[in-house]
Structures are given as C-alpha cells and as structure tokens.
Amino acid sequence: MKNPAKLLQLKRQYEAFYARHPKFMRYLAYIIDSCMEEGTVMDVTVTAADGKAVHGNARLTAEDVAFLQEVRRQLSKDD
C-alpha cells in the first residue's frame, strides 16, 4: 500500500504543475487521446537551461498505451 500522504502531496504537485503549464498538459492529453496506439514512437528532446539537449525515444506496446490511457483517465477525474 502506498503512503496516502505522499499520494496527496503528489496530487497537489500535479495540480500546481497543471496551473503553471495548462497548455502543455492539454497537449499531452490530446496526444494520449488521439495519437497513441501500439507501435507509436514517442520521441522526446529536453533542452536544459545551459543548452544541453538530451534525446530519447520509445516504441509503445499495447500495455504502454493502456497505461497512459489509464493515467489520463485518473488525472482527468478531478478536472
């Protein structure tokens, strides 16, 4: 069993992140709702403040897609 206090803290942090970046969160929700299917390749590049870029990608399995859709459903319950 997960610590309920830590889960509540994570929920508050998510809500604060959402408040600071609502367009980004809506973009992620759109991707999960419309573009995710088995075989989709997620390709991500993150650029740090110092300009260093880190790149990675993953080809999604059916289990990955189901997980992302469930996360999306759980997070949208409070919206």
Image (spheres, grey):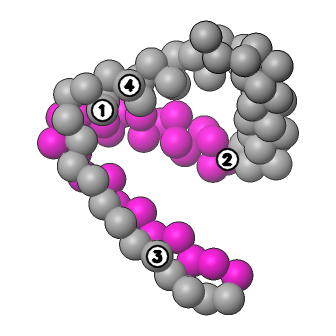
Give, as a three-letter code, the residue at label 3: Val
Q: Residue at x 61, y 88 (%)?
A: 51
Give, as a three-letter code, the residue at label 1: Asp
Q: Do residues under tags 2 and 4 come within 8 Å of each other at their CB atoms?
A: no
Q: CA distance from mark 3 to mark 4?
A: 24 Å
Label 4 residue SS? helix
Earlier-in-chain disc, 2 versus 4:
2
Q: Which residues are magenta?
A: 23-49
Residue 22 placed where, x, y %?
72, 43
Earlier-in-chain disc, 2 versus 3:
2
Question: Residue 29 colored magenta?
Answer: yes
Earlier-in-chain disc, 2 versus 1:
2
Front residue (pair 50, 40): 50
Which mark's residue is nearer the viewer, 2 or 1?
A: 1
The residue indicated by pointer 3 is 54
Label 2 residue SS? helix
The reply, left or right, for residue 2 in relation to residue 12 is left
Q: In the current view of this chain or complex, which residue is farthest to the bottom? A: 51
The residue indicated by pointer 1 is 64
Q: CA distance from mark 2 to mark 3?
A: 22 Å
Q: CA distance from mark 2 to mark 1?
A: 23 Å
Q: Residue at x 55, y 44 (%)?
A: 27
From the viewer's perspective, is residue 26 above or below residue 58? Answer: above
The residue indicated by pointer 2 is 23
Q: CA distance from mark 1 to mark 3?
A: 22 Å
Q: CA distance from mark 2 to mark 4?
A: 22 Å
Residue 52 placed where, x, y %?
56, 86
The residue indicated by pointer 4 is 67
